Image (spheres, grey):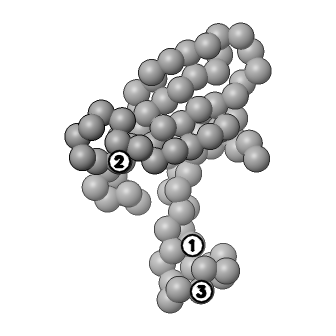
Amino acid sequence: AFGRKLSIFRNIGTGDYSNPSEWVEKVIETNIGLVFDVKVEDMNRDGKVDLLVTNHLGLLNSSAVFVYEIPTDIMTGEYIRHTIAIG
C-alpha cells in the first residue's frame, strides 16, 4: 500500500505486538510523496544499515530513489536523506 509519509514503529510494551497502544511511531519524512518500497541495506558499506526508499508520484521525472542514514537512536536521531536517482 502507498503511504504519504515515511515512518518507523517501535514496540514499547510487554511484547503484545497486536496491541496498537504498545507501538510508537517515528515520522521520518512527510513530504516524500507516495512511498512505494523500503529496504534495509548497507548502501555505502560502512557497516551500518540504511533505508533504501522509492516513491511513486506518477509524473515523469518526479519519482525518485532515496537513501536515509539510520541514526544510532532510531526514535530521536536525525535521518539524513540522500537522493540517488530521479525519474
In this rendering, does residue 33 appear at all? no
Residue 50 in picture, x, y percent from top left: 38, 43
Q: Which residue is mark 2?
A: 49
Mark 3: which secondary structure? loop
Find the residue positioned furthest to the left: 46
Disc tally is: 3
Q: Amino acid at mark 2?
A: Val
Say above or below: 70 vs 58: below
Quadrant for the C terminus in the image: top right
Write the residue at 52% across / 56% down: 8
The span from disc 1 to disc 3 (Cα, nearest Å) is 10 Å
Q: Which residue is mark 1?
A: 23
Q: Which of the two marks, 2 or 3, is nearer to us in this view?
A: 2
Q: Earlier in the sequence, mark 2 or mark 1?
A: 1
Residue 62, numbered circle? none
Q: Which residue is mark 3?
A: 16
Mark 3 crowd level (few <14, some 14–19, many ≥20, 10 Å Cα) = few
Residue 22 in picture, x, y percent from top left: 57, 79
Residue 74 in picture, x, y percent from top left: 38, 57
Q: Quadrant of residue 57?
A: top right
Q: Which of the two marks, 2 or 1, is nearer to us in this view?
A: 2
Mark 2: which secondary structure? loop
Mark 1 crowd level (few <14, some 14–19, many ≥20, 10 Å Cα) = some
Mark 1: which secondary structure? strand
Q: Nearer the viewer, residue 73 or 46?
A: 46
Q: Quadrant of residue 69?
A: top left
Write the residue at 30% across / 33% down: 44
Q: Amino acid at mark 3?
A: Asp
Say above or below: 3 vs 19: above
Q: Earlier in the sequence, mark 1 or mark 3?
A: 3
Q: Which of the two marks, 1 or 3, is nearer to us in this view?
A: 3
Q: Earlier in the sequence, mark 2 or mark 3?
A: 3
